[in-house]
Image (spheres, helix red, strand yellow):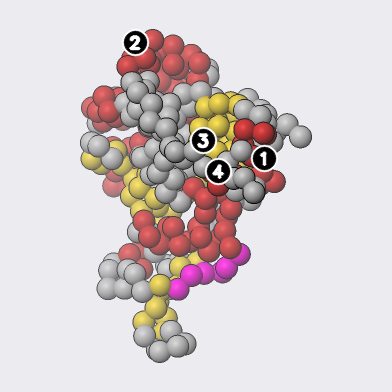
Amino acid sequence: MSKRLSMAEAIARYVPDGTSVALGLALESLIPFAAGHEIIRQHRRDLTLIGPISDILFDQLIGAGCVSTIQAAWVGNVSEGLGHCYRRAVERSYPHAITVEEYSNHTIALALLAGSIGSPYIPTQTLLGSDIPRQNPNLRVTSSPLDDMPTLLVPALRPDVTIIHVQRSDEEGNAHAWGNLGICASAFLAAQNVIVVTEELVSRTTILSDPNRMLGPSYKVCAVVHEPGGAHPSPVQGHTNRDHAFYHEYHQHTRTPEGFQQWLTRWVLNIPNRATYLAHLGEDRVRALRLKEHHYAAPVDYGY
């Protein structure tokens, strides 16, 4: 059964106000910027964002007023520093106050892992002695029943929807991703629904030729969006490189609320879809980000 939808249809149907959304699970690569921009265009509100080292997509959603809660290890601009919108929201409640539930990269991974395997929590000793358990009341320090040693319980996180950008998928949501995947698989399995955004739309036969590249079962997928270039400015292994200059430009332009609004109008609000976005970026810049040479993995023999 085909689950193919446009980006606008997928966000309208599966990301209503108040949704908890997991994004940017592969760390610096495969960030679903096109999905985030459509969320902004549809004026979603009261969202909870879940992720590890969250790049400027979180910052944009916060600045656009879409977010009420952050469950993450860090929010900012990886190659440039702090996220200005995030900082304004925390320090000045602008455009409104947000709740920040602090995690480390490891504990956000454990929380999603617990959600993915149906466990209420996962015990660990990481973070003991740090301030994070005091800042995040969801993290509970107790005594281990095995040796009475202090133990941190990390409750499961189960996003309403996880949005994953991949290199290729079929129309049913059987998808391949490769490169640094971070915690994509756990977030895929923990979510109630998954939106797959794909560079290439391929046959099921292509997917079945290499099942180990699949992140999770297609029955978790509610929508497949064919959106080439949908992860820009983040890199997509085998397709495009990271647009370092774009991150720098964003950092410079968003130092003030007025600058952010100008940036948002130019790159999101006045852009109806991703094709228009790439045209606005310019063919020369798009071409410069494409691969200069290919490095293929060695073939894998699945014969028997």
Vertical order, 274 against 181 (above or below): above
Vertical order, 239 against 215 (above or below): above
List the residue tagged with mark 1.
222
Magenta-drawn segment: 118-123
Disc 2 or 1, which lies upstream in sequence?
1
The structure residue drawn at horizontal position 55% and vertical position 26%, both measured from the top left corner, is: 200
Q: How far apart are marks 3 and 1 (CA)?
A: 15 Å
The structure residue drawn at horizontal position 32% and vertical position 16%, both measured from the top left corner, is: 288
| Amino acid found under the numbered disc labelled 1 | Cys
Q: Is residue 27 left or right of residue 187?
A: left
Q: What element carries label 2?
A: helix
Disc 2 or 4, which lies upstream in sequence?
2
| Amino acid found under the numbered disc labelled 4 | Asp
Q: How far apart are marks 3 and 2 (CA)?
A: 24 Å
Q: In the picture, which quadrant includes the N terminus? A: top right
| Amino acid found under the numbered disc labelled 2 | Asp
User: Can you tell which mark lies on residue 301?
Assistant: 4
Q: Is residue 138 a member of the stretch shown in magenta?
A: no
